[in-house]
Amino acid sequence: MENNNVGKCSQPLSESFQLNSGTEKYLQASERPGHEKAGSDGLPQPEFLRLTTWKNPRINVWRVSTTFLAFFIMGLHDGAYGALIPYLEIYYNKSHLLVSLIFVPASVGYIAASFLNSFIHIHLGRRGVAFLGPCLRLITYIVISQNCPFPGLVVCFCVSAFGIALTDSAWNAWIAGMQNSHEVLGILHAFYGLGATLSPLIATAMITKGALVWYSFYYLMIGLSIAELATGGAAFWTETGKKYRADHEKTTGKTSGHTREALGSRVTWICCFFLLLLTGTEVALGGWVVQFMRIVRLAAPFPAGMSATGFWLGLTVGRVVGGFVTSRIGEKLAVLASLSPAPKHPLNSVGAHLIFWLVPNFFTSAVAVTFVGLFIGPLFPAAMVAVTKILPAHLHVGSIGFSTAFGMTGAAVLPFAVGAIAQVRGVSVLMPIVLGLLIADGCVWCTLPSTQKRSSESHNDQIDNATV
C-alpha cells in the first residue's frame, strides 16, 4: 500500500502553465486524474480560469465578439450626450442645470448594479447578464424614441444606466481574467471609444444635416440593442447560474458570492475611486466639450460637434495602442506617466489639457482635446488588469464588478456637477475642473500596491494586509 502511494506521488509532472494574464507565474501540477492545479492564492485553480483565452474554447471567439458589440453600443450611448445636450436645452427649454439632471439618476442605476452584479452572476450566470443588460436598454430606447417628457427622460437614463453598468462590469471581469488580457481589454474598450467617436458625428449629422428631431437617434439604438440581445443571448446561452456556481465552487469551495470579501480589500476601494474620477472626467469632458466650443471658442454647431468626435477618437486609439504599451512597461508606470503633472512628462493628458485650456483657438483646442482622449484611453483597461494581478482569482468578479459599476457613478455625478457650476460660472469652468480631476486621479493611483509578481505566500499576506 505504501509503495503504491509512493509510486503515485512520483509520477512525472506535466508542463508548466501560466495561471492567468496577471500573475506572470508558472506552476507545476500533477497529471493524476482529479488532481487540481493550485492558484496563486493557494486554492485550486479550475480549468475555466487556467485555459480561457479569447479563442479557447472556440466559442469564446463568438462571445468576445458580442462583448465588443455591447461596448460599441455603450459608447454610442455615452458619446451622444455631448452632441444632444444643446438640443435638449432648446427642445425642453431647460437650463444647463436642469439638463444636467439626466446624469444624476443614472448614478442610482450604477450603484444598484455594483451591489447586484455578483448576485446576478450566481443566480443567472453570464447568460442572465447577456439578456438583462440589453433588455433594459432596449426598453428605455423605445420610450425615449416616443418623445417622452423630460421627467420620463431622466427615469429612462436611470434604468439604462443599470443595464450599462451590469454589462460593463460583467464583461470587464470576464475578459480581465483571461490570459493575455491586456490586448483584449484594450480592444474591448476601443470598441467603446469607437462608438463614442461615431455617436456625436451621427447624432449631429442627423439633426443639422438631416433636419431630424433629436430623439430620432434612438431608433438606431433600438436596432443595435436588438442585435446585441440576440447575439449575446445565443453566445452565452450555456453560461448559466448553475455553471457559474460550479466553476467558482471549484475555486473557493463556496457557492456564495464574493462581493463582501472583495469589499474588504483596500485594492477594491482604490480602484473604485480611481475609476469614479476617470469615468467622470471622460463623460464630463466628452459631454460638455461641444457647449464649450460653441460658447467659449465661438465654433459653429457642426464643427463643435466634431470636437467631441475628436476626443472619443483619441480615446479609441489610446485604448488600442495603449494595451500593447502598458503590457510592456507595467500598469503602475503607464498610468503615472499619463496623469503626472511633472515637467519631465509634459506630453501627457495633463499637458494636452493645459494646451486645450490656455490656447484660445478652436483648431488648437480641437487637436488638444483629441490628445487628452489619447492619453487617458489606456487607463481603464490598465486598472482592470492591475486588479487581476493583485487580487486572487476568486475575487476578480466581485472586485472588478463592484469597482467598475461603482466607478461609473462618476459618469453621472461629475458631469452634473460641471453643469450645475456652469449654470453660475459659465461653461468655461469645465477646464479647471477637468485639470483637477486628472491630477486627483493620479494621486489615487499612487496608493495602489505594486503589481509585480510575488510568491504564493507573500501574495496571500498582501491580501490579508490590504483589508480595511
Image (spheres, grey):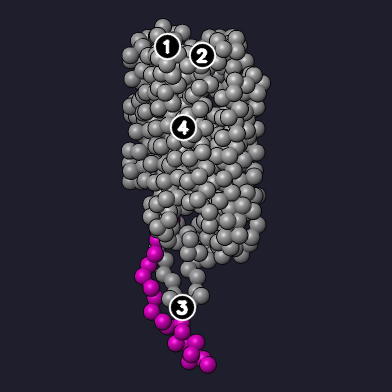
Nearest to viewer (mark 2 / mark 3): 2
Amino acid at the residue labelled 2: Pro
Alpha carbons under labels 1 and 3: distance apart: 68 Å
Alpha carbons under labels 1 and 2: distance apart: 9 Å
**Numbered disc 4: secondary structure:** helix
Could you classify mark 3 by the number of other residues whose Cα lies within 10 Å: few (under 14), some (14-19), or many (20 or more)?
Answer: few
Q: Earlier in the sequence, mark 4 or mark 2?
A: 4
Amino acid at the residue labelled 4: Gly
Nearest to viewer (mark 4 / mark 3): 4
Q: Which residues are magenta?
A: 1-25
- Check disc 1 and report the residue beneath it: 301
**Numbered disc 1: secondary structure:** helix
- Check disc 4 and report the residue beneath it: 75
Q: Is residue 138 above or below residue 341?
A: below
Q: Which mark is residue 86?
A: 2
Amino acid at the residue labelled 1: Pro
Alpha carbons under labels 4 and 3: distance apart: 47 Å
The reply to whether the C-beta atoms of the residues labelled 2 and 3 are less than 8 Å apart is no
Q: Earlier in the sequence, mark 1 or mark 2?
A: 2
Could you classify mark 4 by the number of other residues whose Cα lies within 10 Å: few (under 14), some (14-19), or many (20 or more)?
Answer: many
The reply to whether the C-beta atoms of the residues labelled 4 and 2 are less than 8 Å apart is no
